Image: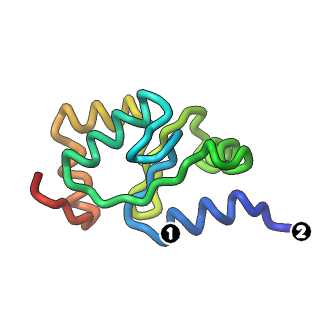
Amino acid sequence: MSENPAISAIQDATSSHDVVLFMKGTPLFPQCGFSQQVVQILSYLGVQFKSVNVLDSDEIREGIKAFSDWPTIPQLYVKNEFVGGCDIIREMFEQGELRDYLAEKGVDLVAA
């Protein structure tokens, strides 16, 4: 049985970095408003994160949806765990839950 290279790349990214954002575009040049919102929230909180531009690979773009069983992008992973997409991240941030969640997971936040 051959291993799916896209799933392997996703697993490698989520297990090798504390915070990973699968997004459209890059943090400096987001290609959709939802990705931009999540980047702004993470940046505001001072979270260092790895980004993966799903527009660079059809296999990654489709693979991440299957991997998380979540149909939309962006997708945020913390400590190898799927947290959610833009709406969930925005709601957690607005409720003050995202900072607490990150702190509980041991993610360092740089004072903003």
SS of the residue at dot 1? helix
Determine which of the numbered discs, if any, sits on residue 15 in the image.
1
- In front: 31, or 71? 31
How many C-alpha atoms fall within 10 Å of the one at disc 1: few (<14), some, or many (≥20)? Answer: some
Image side of residue 51 versus residue 72, left or right: left
Q: Residue at x 62, y 42 (%)?
A: 55
**Hey, what amino acid is under mark 2?**
Met
C-alpha separation, residue under disc 2 versus residue under disc 1: 23 Å
Determine which of the numbered discs, if any, sits on residue 45 in the image.
none
Residue 51 location, x and y as percent? 46, 54
Sequence-wise first label, 2 or 1: 2
Residue 106 location, x and y as percent? 25, 67
Q: Residue at x 60, y 59 (%)?
A: 10
Q: Residue at x 55, y 48 (%)?
A: 53
Image side of residue 39 versus residue 31, left or right: left
- In front: 109, or 104? 109
The correct choice, above or below, for 26 with respect to 3 in the image is above
The correct choice, above or below, for 33 with respect to 18 in the image is above
Residue 47 location, x and y as percent? 26, 56
Residue underneath mark 2? 1
SS of the residue at dot 2? loop
Q: Quadrant of the N terminus?
A: bottom right
Instruction: In the displayed orientation, state which residue is furthest to the bottom.
Output: 16
**Hey, what amino acid is under mark 1?**
Ser
Residue 61 location, x and y as percent? 65, 43
Instruction: In the displayed orientation, state which residue is furthest to the front.
Output: 29
Image side of residue 12 versus residue 85, left or right: right
Instruction: In the displayed orientation, state which residue is furthest to the right.
Output: 1
